[in-house]
């Protein structure tokens, strides 16, 4: 019977967690540190808004919500971006028709990719592991890799990308900004220049901004491509974000896409048969969370707590001969293990040995995106991704475990 089905590879992070469970990992076991997790600590952190732990559901909320989301939540989201990034008088403001609500980032991306025509879509290598499956499953697009260079610490170079875009006739680009896994950020003048190029070259950019308020060593603590849009109805830009990272409500699966109204209409049409829409009760509860003052307060708390965790993890990894790409954003450290001793000097080997010491990382190969398995050789085999999403106590436990593993093979 399996012959009736297409074969897909499981998400790298899911594979990692399944293997960890085979080695005895459970969420409740505090002797483990999950450096592999793609979520921020969901509990109380000092200075953040009070966490929602319960809410009432009316009979009306037990009905289906509109596929594109509740109008009141769409307007709430539009207002948030207008207040934060489009508050100058001369800038046209978003309204609810510029917003599409969906059940998580992967569903938002699926709606977008499914809506595209038969075009070439560029993606960065390395980038978010789940892009691989999304870029593989929809046959309407042709995914083309753009390799970020290790010698440049995986920083984006617009001049080089312009040549790439013209050579391969790229019509769309998808990227996480801030980046998962490298922690790099395209911000300020560089971000403005990229958007201007997209406008001139008439190609679509899909900005995954789920980590838009995880910024370190910058004057700003949150940012968005929406700040640099000249004409929100004509600029070929889509921005996605949601509650998962920026408010640390990953289990709610409430996400939004912002873009020109004609594009948002297409996303709703695709959503009508692809997923049917997002939870009505959770959308209503999200109204308590999504506002400017709440986000600014949350962002200040995140910056204080996550900067401390980042610095602690980076300093320890550097002492232990990892080659570390110090993150400017997100909550990941992208580290090269090639200088470590055998048998922990590749991503997979390090991962396997780490499980024996009760900590979890994600091997770099899972961010070496390869839709449709076109490439035989992978380039990120010397890397691992560490998350500093867990709370500080778990990070400290994990750091002791890393030291123990390194000493074991010295």
Image (cartoon, rainbow, N blue to C red):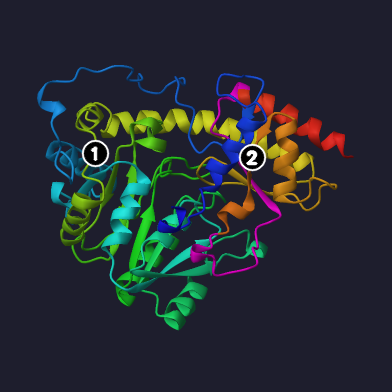
Q: Is residue 297 left or right of residue 302?
A: left
Quarter occupied by residue 71: top left
Q: Give the range drawn in magenta.
A: 369-393
Farthest-out residue, bottom: 167
- The tally of labels here is 2
Quarter occupied by residue 396: top right
Which residue is depicted at the point 65% across and 63% down? 379
Q: Which of 306 and 165 is in front in this view?
A: 165
Residue on which the image places disc 1: 278
Q: In this view, does 384 lie to the left or right of 274?
A: right
Which residue is depicted at the point 31% across and 29% down? 294
Quarter occupied by residue 390: top right
Q: Which of 327 and 380 is in front in this view?
A: 380
Is residue 388 among the parts visible in the rendering? Answer: yes
Q: Nearer the viewer, residue 349 or 169?
A: 349
Is residue 157 among the parts visible in the rendering? Answer: no
Residue on which the image places disc 2: 361
Q: Does the magenta stretch include residue 394?
A: no
| Image vertical order of residue 410 relative to residue 152, above or below | above
């Amino acid at each position: 019977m399996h012959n009736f089905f297409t074969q897909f590879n499981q998400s790298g992070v899911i594979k990692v967690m399944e293997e960890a469970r085979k080695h005895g990992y459970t969420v409740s076991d505090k002797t483990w540190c999950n450096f592999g997790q793609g979520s921020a600590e969901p509990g109380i952190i000092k200075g953040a808004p009070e966490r929602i732990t319960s809410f009432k559901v009316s009979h009306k909320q037990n009905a289906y919500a509109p596929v594109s989301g509740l109008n009141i939540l769409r307007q709430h989201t539009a207002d948030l971006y207008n207040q934060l990034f489009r508050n100058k008088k001369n800038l046209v403001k978003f309204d609810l028709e510029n917003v599409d609500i969906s059940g998580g980032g992967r569903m938002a991306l699926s709606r977008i990719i499914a809506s595209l025509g038969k075009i070439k879509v560029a993606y960065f290598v390395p980038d978010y592991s789940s892009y691989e499956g999304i870029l593989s499953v929809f046959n309407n697009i042709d995914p083309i890799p753009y390799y970020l260079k290790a010698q440049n610490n995986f920083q984006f170079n617009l001049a080089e990308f312009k040549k790439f875009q013209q050579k391969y006739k790229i019509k769309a680009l998808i990227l996480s900004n801030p980046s998962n896994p490298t922690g790099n950020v395209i911000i300020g003048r560089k971000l403005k220049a990229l958007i201007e190029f997209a406008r001139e070259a008439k190609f679509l950019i899909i900005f995954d901004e789920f980590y838009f308020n995880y910024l370190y060593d910058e004057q700003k603590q949150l940012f968005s491509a929406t700040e640099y849009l000249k004409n929100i109805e004509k600029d070929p830009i889509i921005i996605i974000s949601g509650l998962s990272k920026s408010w640390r409500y990953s289990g709610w699966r409430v996400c939004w896409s912002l873009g020109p109204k004609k594009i948002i209409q297409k996303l709703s049409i695709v959503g009508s048969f692809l997923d049917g829409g997002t939870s009505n009760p959770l959308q209503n509860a999200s109204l308590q969370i999504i506002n400017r003052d709440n986000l600014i307060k949350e962002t200040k708390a995140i910056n204080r707590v996550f900067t401390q965790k980042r610095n602690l993890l980076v300093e320890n990894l550097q002492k232990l001969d990892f080659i570390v790409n110090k993150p400017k954003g997100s909550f990941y450290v992208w580290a090269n293990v090639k200088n470590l001793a055998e048998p922990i000097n590749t991503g997979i080997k390090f991962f396997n040995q780490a499980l024996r010491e009760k900590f979890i990382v994600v091997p770099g190969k899972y961010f070496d995106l390869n839709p449709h398995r076109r490439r035989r050789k992978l380039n990120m085999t010397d890397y691992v991704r560490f998350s500093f999403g867990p709370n500080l106590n778990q990070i400290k436990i994990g750091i002791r475990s890393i030291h123990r593993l390194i000493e074991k093979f010295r």
